[in-house]
Amino acid sequence: MKAKRSSASRASKARRQPERWSARVMQTSNALDLEPGIFKSADPGAVARSLKRSAENSTRRKADPFRSAMSMLTFYINRAGKNLPKRRVRVLQQAKDELRALFHRPRRAARRTPTSPASNPDTEPQRQPLTGRG
């Protein structure tokens, strides 16, 4: 049988701030020296240029500059994603495309909206018409 927790212990837990390890990574990343507030910019090009500059100037990164910059951007989108407004996510997704262009990498294909399988010929293989049994 479980013992009930006192209301005092529940209240103290609610007041305590949760640990935000992802915020700490963004602030103290050993790989890139990020410009303060860069992910709050409304200009995807400015975000991409800043990440590129940080990645190219860093001597502590383990991967190539493109990979480091893209990883930091993706990390931010994924960790803050549920709390980001759709407009911010859209700007940051556009920053990914800008980053690819700055590093002369091919852009990703446009993201398609999900459709029903019946109306999307790419999701189901074409079926051959049934013929007589033989």
Image (spheres, rainbow, N blue to C red):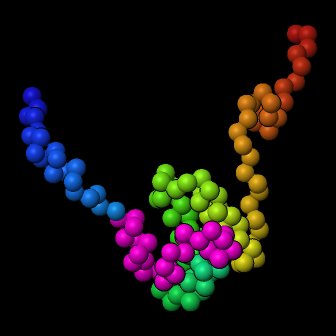
Residue 10 appears at what percent x and percent y? 16, 44
Quarter of the image for the C terminus: give it. top right
Vertical placement of residue 113 versus 73, above or below: above
Query: Is 95 on the left or on the right of 75, as rendered?
Result: right
| Residue 33 part of the magenta-drawn span | yes
At horizontal 8% and vertical 34% (from top left) the residue drawn is 3
Q: Using the image as rendered, state which of residue 33 and residue 10 is in the foreground.
A: 10
Name which quarter of the figure residue 50 lies in: bottom right
Left or right for 123, reference 81: right
Left or right, residue 94 beside residue 19 = right
Residue 131 vs 45, above or below: the answer is: above
Q: What residue do we see at 47% from left, 59% from top?
A: 79
Quadrant containing the N terminus in the rendered view = top left
> Can you give x and y, in whole percent of width and height, for residue 116 in the image?
73, 30
In the picture as drawn, the residue positioned furthest to the top comes out as 133
* The magenta segment: 21-48
Query: How far across and down, in percent of the image, does residue 33 sit?
Result: 48, 83
Q: Is residue 105 left or right of residue 71?
A: right
Instruction: Give the total of numbered labels.
Output: 0
Q: Residue at x 72, y 78 (%)?
A: 102
Task: Determine the residue positioned at 54% across, 60% down.
Answer: 77
Q: Is residue 15 above or below residue 72?
A: above
Q: Is residue 15 visible?
A: yes
Provide residue 74's location: percent of width, then percent of height.
Answer: 56, 64
Asked if residue 15 lies in the magenta stretch, the reply is: no
Query: Residue 67: in sight, yes or no?
Result: no
